[in-house]
Image (cartoon, rainbow, N blue to C red):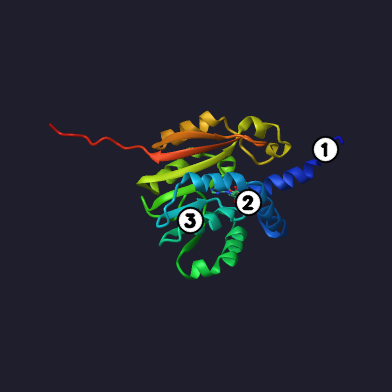
Amino acid sequence: MPRLPVPDVLLRTLGRQLGGPSGPLGSLVALIMNKGNGPAITAAVDALELTGSEEVADIGFGGGLGLGLLLDQTRDGGRVHGVEPSLDMVKRAHKAHHEEVAAGRLELHEAGMESLPIADGALDGWISVNTVYFVEDLHPAFVELRRVLAPAGRGVLGIADPEWMAQQAITTYNFTVRPVGDVVSALTAAGLSVEQRTLTGSRPYHLLVCRPEVIPEVTRE
Ligand SMILES: C[S@@+](CC[C@H](N)C(=O)[O-])C[C@H]1O[C@@H](n2cnc3c(N)ncnc32)[C@H](O)[C@@H]1O
C-alpha cells in the first residue's frame, strides 16, 4: 500500500518535541523514543563495559530508558546522573525512579550538555544518544563532555547514519544532520580520541566511543 504523506504541521510538531519533549504530547513522544531508540541506547550502554561500581551519566536521556539500563549496570555501589534540558522529562524520570533518587543512586539535572552540573573528571562513563542533532554549537558542548570524563573514562555518543536521516521527512524540522566525519572532528578538537563502531540493521547507526586524549607531560631539561 502506498504511504500517505505526513502533513507538515505534524512533522514540525514532532520535530520540536524530539528536540525537547514537553506536555501531554511529550509523554507520548517519550514512550515512542524509548521503544524506537531502544537498540541504540542498549548498544551505547553495553559499549561502556561497566563492572558495577562506576559513576556514569545519560546526557539528554529523553524518555529515560538509558537511566534504567545504567542503574541496572551500576548495582555494585555505582551512581547515575541523568542530564536533560526538558523539565517535563526530568519530572517523568523522577517519578519513575524516586526510590533511586532518594537513595542517592540517581541524580537528575535539568541542564544541557553545554553546561554540565558535574565536577571535572567525575564520570567513568557517559552516553548521549540522538542528542547532537539539537545542539547548535558542538565545540563548547564537546569540551564539556571531555571535562567531566575521568582520565580512564569512556563516553559513547550515538548518532543515526546521516544518509538515512536525510531520507526521513522529520529531519527537515529542528534537526541539524551532520556528516559523521564532522562530529568526529569536533570530538577530536575537544580533546577526545574516537573509535567509530557502526551498527547495521534496518536503521544504520554509529556509536562514537570517546576517550580523553592523553596530553603528554612536558619534560624540562
Ligand atoms: C531525540 S531525543 C533522544 C532521547 C534519548 N537519548 C533517546 O535516544 O531516546 C533528544 C533529547 O535530547 C535532548 N536535548 C536537546 N538539546 C540538548 C542539549 N543541548 N543537551 C542535552 N540534551 C539535549 C532533548 O530534550 C531530548 O530529550
Circle 1 or circle 3, nearest the eye: 3
Which residue is pictured at 52% across the width and 30% down the height? Answer: 182
- As shown in the figure, which amino acid type bears the numbered disc 3? Gln
Q: Name the residue under label 3.
A: 73
Give the mark nearer the N terminus: 1 vs 2: 1
Instruction: Check residue 5 in the rendering and tell me which mark sits there, or answer none.
Output: 1
Distance in Å between CA atoms under marks 1 and 2: 24 Å
Circle 1 or circle 2, nearest the eye: 1
Give the farthest residue toward the right.
1
Give the mark nearer the N terminus: 1 vs 3: 1
Which quarter of the figure is the N terminus placed in?
top right
Judged left or right of residue 220, residue 74 is right
Distance in Å between CA atoms under marks 3 and 2: 27 Å
Ligand 1 within 8 angstroms of badge 2 C-beta = yes
Ligand 1 within 8 angstroms of badge 1 C-beta = no
Give the mark nearer the N terminus: 3 vs 2: 2
Residue toward you, 79 or 173: 79
Mark 3 surroundings: few (<14), some (14-19) or many (≥20) residues within 10 A: many
Which residue is pictured at 59% across the width and 54% down the height? Answer: 65
Which residue is pictured at 46% across the width and 41% down the height? Answer: 142
Q: Name the residue under label 2.
A: 20
- As shown in the figure, which amino acid type bears the numbered disc 1? Pro
**Residue 57, position in %: x, y?**
47, 53
